[in-house]
Amino acid sequence: MKSLDEYRKERDLIIEEIGDFDEEDFVKSGISLEEYTSPNEETIKKLVEYVSSEYDQTSIYSE
C-alpha cells in the first residue's frame, strides 16, 4: 500500500502537467480540498480521469 507522501508525489506530477489546480478544477473534478490535500488511490483515479477528460495531454498516465 502506498504512503500519503507517494500519493502526494503522484498528485504533484499530474498537476505539473496542467499547471495550477484552481477552484474551477475542484468543482469540475468533484475532488474536495481535503481529498486534494491528503490524496489516496481514489483521489488519484478521480484526478487522472478529470485531467484526461479536460486536457488533451498524452503524458498523463494512469495505473
Image (tube, rainbow, N blue to C red):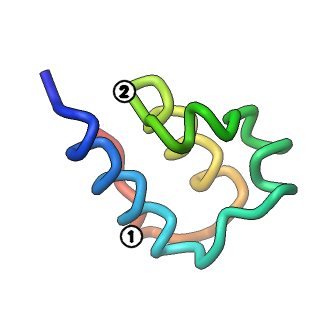
Q: Which mark is residue 27?
A: none
Binning the other alpha carbons within 10 Å of mark 2 as few (below 14), some (14 to 19) or many (20 upward) gives: few
Query: Residue 33, image x and y in percent?
Result: 67, 40
Q: Residue at x 38, y 70 (%)?
A: 59
23 horizontally vs 5: left or right = right
Say which element carries label 1.
loop
The type of residue carrying mark 1 is Ser
Q: Residue at x 16, y 30 (%)?
A: 2
Position above or below: 11 against 7: below
45 horizontally vs 52: left or right = left
Query: Residue 38, image x and y in percent?
Result: 45, 36
The disc, 2 or 1, on the residue closer to the chain's N-terminal end is 2
Q: Do labels 2 and 1 touch, CB within 8 Å? A: no
Quadrant placement of the C terminus: top left
- Residue 55, located in which quarter of the rendered image? bottom right
Q: Residue at x 34, y 49 (%)?
A: 8
14 horizontally vs 10: left or right = right
Say which element carries label 2.
helix
In the picture of the structure, the residue carrying the numbered disc 2 is 41
Query: Residue 6, image x and y in percent?
Result: 21, 45
Query: Residue 17, image x and y in percent?
Result: 48, 74
Binning the other alpha carbons within 10 Å of mark 1 as few (below 14), some (14 to 19) or many (20 upward) gives: few
Quadrant placement of the N terminus: top left
Eye-nearest disc, 2 or 1: 2
Looking at the image, which is closer to me, 52 or 23?
Answer: 23
Q: Residue at x 85, y 42 (%)?
A: 27
In the picture of the structure, the residue carrying the numbered disc 1 is 59
Position above or below: 31 against 13: above
The type of residue carrying mark 2 is Glu
Looking at the image, which is closer to me, 5 or 27?
Answer: 5
